Amino acid sequence: MRSADPATQRRILNRLKRARGQLDAVIAAVEGEGSCQQVVTQLAAVSTALDRAGFSIVSTAMQNCLTDPEGTAEDEDGLTVEQLEKLFLSLA
């Protein structure tokens, strides 16, 4: 994510690291025969954290596209408005 400002990139990384920690908790709960409620609660937390990270990434790309629609398709990611829309919808 080269086009994200450092604060946005840090927030996204924090969400992903939180999701990784929650996934580790799910794995530990399954390996340790944790309760069904514990496993499902942690899975929901992982899913939410990943969704939010994905939406943040797409949102950042969309903001860049709106401020520089011509330049966005030519940058390293090479995303067009249509591709951004497809990415956004894939998270829904």
Image: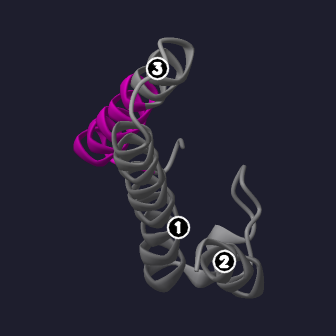
Q: Tag 3, which secondary structure?
A: helix
Q: Which marked residue is nearer to the observer: mark 3 or mark 2?
A: 3
For this view, does 62 lie left or right of residue 69? left
Q: Is residue 8 magenta?
A: yes
* Residue drawn at 72 percent across, 54 percent down: 77
Task: Name the residue rendered at 47%, 60% in the picture.
Answer: 51
Amino acid bearing label 1? Val
Tell me the element at label 1: helix
Q: Which amino acid, mark 3?
A: Asp
Say few, some or many: other residues with alpha carbon within 10 Å of mark 2 (under 14 / 14 to 19 / 20 or more).
some
Q: Which residue is nearer to you in this view: 29 or 25?
A: 29
| Magenta segment main secondary structure | helix
Residue under numbered circle 2: 84
- What's the residue at 45%, 27% (across, down)? 20
Q: Quadrant of the N terminus?
A: top right
Earlier-in-chain disc, 1 versus 2: 1
Is 55 rendered above or below residue 42? Answer: below
To which quarter of the image does residue 79 belong?
Answer: bottom right
Label for residue 87? Answer: none
Badge 1: residue crowd in 10 Å (few <14, some 14–19, many ≥20): some
Q: Observer-nearest residue: 16 or 12? A: 16
Could you tell me if the residues under marks 1 and 3 are in contact, i.e. CB atoms within 8 Å? no
Q: Are marks 1 and 2 in contact (CB under 8 Å)?
A: yes
Q: Nearer the viewer, residue 18 or 9?
A: 18
Residue stretch in magenta: 4-22
Above/below status of 24 relative to 78 = above
The span from disc 1 to disc 3 (Cα, nearest Å) is 26 Å
- Is residue 48 located in the magenta-colored stretch of the structure? no
Q: Where is 1 relative to 71, above or below?
A: above
Residue 58: give its label.
1
- For disc 3, the marked residue is 24
